[in-house]
Amino acid sequence: MARRKFIAGNWKMNKTPDESRELAAGIRKALEGYDKADVAVCPPFVCLAAAGEALKGSNILLGAQNIYWEKSGAFTGEVSPGMLVASGCKAVIVGHSERRQFFGETDETVNKRLKAGLANKLKVIVCVGELLSERQTNVTEQVVKKQVEGGLAGITPAEMAEVTIAYEPVWAIGTGLTASPQQAQEVHAFIRALLRQKFGAGTADAVRIQYGGSVKADNAAKLLEQPDIDGALVGGASLVAGDFAQIVKAGG
Ligand code: 13P
């Protein structure tokens, strides 16, 4: 089935509010009139309002990089689903490998964040991916299976309509070492087969699976033409409006 491509920019811990407004405006301008893919940008929390202003009235979705599952209360440093929605967010990333590596994120907390996002009508991008040592010891599939099953525990096929999976091999993030289109396609096909077992063929065929890890303007097209690669989650190259727009347009 033809799945509409979905390209998201993960700005990570980059850009001030003013810089975010400017970058969002630049991306909007560079994508003016282009409507062949869904696009999201995910600035830091404190930049959501500024970026949102620049995107108002456009088709570009505003997303956050994380979400907490409680509504409010004594959770210093966390941001609630309601706060994200009130800041104009339509999407959120959960389970990024940097959160797993540096901030103790587990499949269980990823699952709670996913459920909180869905309960608040956000589109949720769930990230999975193996470490270099795991690829070298041939346990990529086991690792990804555990992350997909744990992260998506208790989710219904209907809820999966708002879920995107991002396959981001950790060794390819920020390293300039992109997975080859074939390497990425293999894991994407494996993930889709898992989704088929868990949710049925209709749902598995509809879910978009993004690739992430050193996606650039010059390698995006080859990745995006793979049958099970339905988009990209872009870090570094999403910080330059022209580069990000080129990646968006590389999908067709
Ligand atoms: P880079 O594109 O900088 O490798 O980052 C990928 C990523 O982690 C997106 O979430």
Image (tube, rainbow, N blue to C red):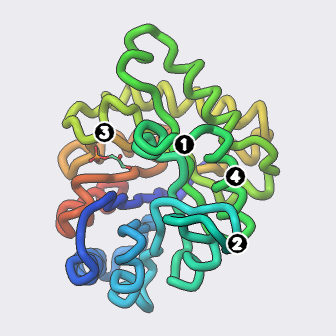
Residue at screen point 22% across, 83% down: 18
- Alpha carbons under labels 3 and 1: distance apart: 17 Å
Dot placed on the residue nearer the N-terminal end, 2 or 3: 2
Image quadrant where one finds the C terminus: bottom left
Residue kind at label 1, given as amino acid type: Glu
Where is residue 80, by image quadrant? bottom right
What's the CA distance linking mark 2 and mark 1? 19 Å
Which is in the foreground here, disc 2 or disc 3?
A: 2
Q: Is residue 211 visible?
A: no
- Residue at which label 2 appears: 71
The residue indicated by pointer 3 is 173
Q: Which residue is mark 1?
A: 105
Closest to the observer: 217 or 90? 90
161 is higher (above) or lower (below) than 182:
below
Quadrant in the rendering for residue 67: bottom right
The mark total stands at 4
Q: Answer with mark 3 or mark 4, whichever residue precedes in sequence.
A: 4
Residue 94: in sight, yes or no?
Answer: yes
Q: Earlier in the sequence, mark 2 or mark 1?
A: 2
Report the side of 166 relative to 215 (left or right): right
Q: Kindly report which numbered mark, 2 or 4, lies closer to the viewer in this rendering.
A: 2
Give how far apart the Cα atoms at labels 4 and 1 are. Answer: 11 Å
Helix, strand or loop status at disc 1: loop
Give me the disc on residue 112. Answer: 4
- Name which of mark 3 and mark 1 comes first in the sequence: 1
Does ligand 1 reach within 8 Å of label 3's beta carbon? yes
Q: Earlier in the sequence, mark 4 or mark 1?
A: 1
Q: Residue at x 81, y 45 (%)?
A: 154
Q: Do labels 2 and 3 touch, CB within 8 Å? A: no
Circles 2 and 4: CB atoms closer than 8 Å: no
